[in-house]
Image: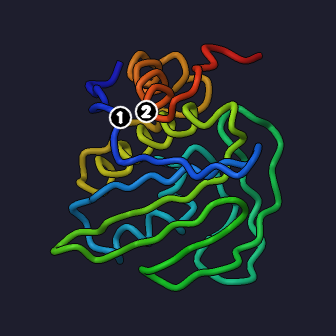
Amino acid sequence: MIDYTPGPASGAEVRKDGEKWTLILVRELRHSPEKVWQALTDPAQLREWAPFVADGNLGTVGSTVNLTWVGTQRATETRVTRAEATKVLEYGDIRWELEALGGGTRLRLWHNIDRRFISWGAAGWHIAFDVLDRLLSGTPISRIAGNEAIKFVGWQRLNAEYAKQFGIETNASED
């Protein structure tokens, strides 16, 4: 197995609007906004760290890209609604904000997630951000997503920690 243990749950908040909740995760990366932007938009780089596969570049407003989430067989047609290089990227129910911070980037993710799975999403994205950071640092580890993530001990701990932070019960497993 990989030599990786995620740090404690941090940098997350939830905005609640009925059943529709928005997960906001913030991570400071040691990499330039240009390098992070490439990792957020280039299908080859996304395949290395993101919990989905994109069949096209996500960096062009108006483009339609099929996203296939790891562990599913169904592609979801997704339209890029905003793409301001190195600043903001929006598609589907996801928005990325990049802010230059010293020599690095403050990356902020906004993801609308069914409230029953908000701690799952936080744990999954936490791990994805760690994998992204390693990829951009030149010390890549394999993507940890879908069922592989759920079986990962670090994910289970993060799921419980985020659930506690958000004041919700954990969904230990859903079939």
Indicate the secondary structure of the residue bearing disc 1. loop
Question: Residue 143 at x, y = what percent?
Answer: 47, 38
Q: Nearer the viewer, mark 1 or mark 2?
A: 2
Q: Residue at x 34, y 75 (%)?
A: 99
Indicate the secondary structure of the residue bearing disc 2. helix
- Counting residues from the start of the chain, the first of labels 1 and 2 encountered is 1
Q: Residue at x 69, y 31 (%)?
A: 116
Instruction: State the mark number for residue 97.
Output: none
Say which of 145 and 22 sits in front.
22
Q: Residue at x 83, y 43 (%)?
A: 74
Q: Is 64 left, or right, of 125 in this rendering?
A: right
Q: In the image, is residue 168 above or below residue 166?
A: above
Q: What residue did someone put label 1 on? A: 9
Q: What residue did someone put label 2 on? A: 165
Quarter of the picture containing the C terminus is top right
Amino acid found under the numbered disc labelled 1: Ala
Amino acid found under the numbered disc labelled 2: Gln
Which residue is the extreme one toward the left? 102
Question: Residue 78 at x, y = what percent?
Answer: 77, 64
Number of marks in the rendered image: 2
Q: Are marks 1 and 2 in contact (CB under 8 Å)?
A: yes
Say which of 102 and 64 sits in front.
102
Say which of 52 and 138 sits in front.
52
- How far is the residue under mark 1 from the one under mark 2? 8 Å
Colour option used: rainbow
Q: Residue at x 63, y 60 (%)?
A: 94
